[in-house]
Amino acid sequence: MNNLNTIEQLAETIKARQNQMPNGSYTASLFQKGENVIVKKLGEEFVEMIVEFSREDKQRMVSETTDFLYHLLVMLSLKNISLDELYEEIEKRAK
């Protein structure tokens, strides 16, 4: 499987949780709690990621970066920003 496909599948799952709001879903609970909680969680994950980079424990860096990416995808979904929009911006910057 293409790695970008995996991220796209995760983004689609997050969007589905946002739309369906299933009971017991951590993702749905974030959307229910609202933007302030999502922003706070995203910030916490960013700090945890940076801390692990300074400690140079590769496995923890990977783990915390994954947590940050997940919460970033939640925020993007909340703001209706698609991965395609990010890809377009990345392509502009790559030229």
Image (spheres, rainbow, N blue to C red):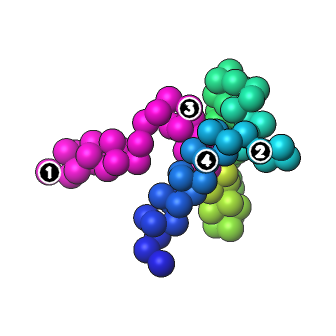
* Mark 3, secondary structure of its residue: helix
Disc 2 and disc 3 in contact, CB within 8 angstroms: no
Q: Position of residue 63 (x, y in %)?
A: 68, 60
Q: Position of residue 70 (x, y in %)?
A: 61, 49
In this image, 4 relative to 72: left or right? left
Q: Is residue 90 part of the magenta span, yes or no?
A: yes
| Residue picked out by circle 1 | 95
Mark 2 or mark 4, which has the lower sequence index? 4
- Residue most toward the bottom? 1
Residue 78, labelled with which disc? 3
| Residue picked out by circle 2 | 22
Seen from the viewer's position, the closer of residues 55 and 82 is 82
Query: How many other residues sit within 10 Å of disc 3, few (<14), some (14-19) or many (≥20)?
Result: some
Magenta-highlighted stretch: main secondary structure? helix
Q: Nearer the viewer, mark 4 or mark 1?
A: 4
Q: Nearer the viewer, mark 3 or mark 4?
A: 4
Query: How many other residues sit within 10 Å of disc 4, few (<14), some (14-19) or many (≥20)?
Result: some
Q: Position of residue 85 (x, y in %)?
A: 33, 42
Residue 43, labelled with which disc? none
Seen from the viewer's position, the closer of residues 82 and 92 is 82
Mark 2 or mark 3, which has the lower sequence index? 2
Q: Is residue 26 part of the magenta span, yes or no?
A: no
Mark 3 or mark 4, which has the lower sequence index? 4
Locate residue 36: give its quadrant: top right
- Residue most toward the left? 95
* Mark 1, secondary structure of its residue: loop
Residue beneath the point at 14% across and 51% down? 95
Please name the amino acid that badge 2 sits on: Pro
Locate residue 65: give its quadrant: bottom right
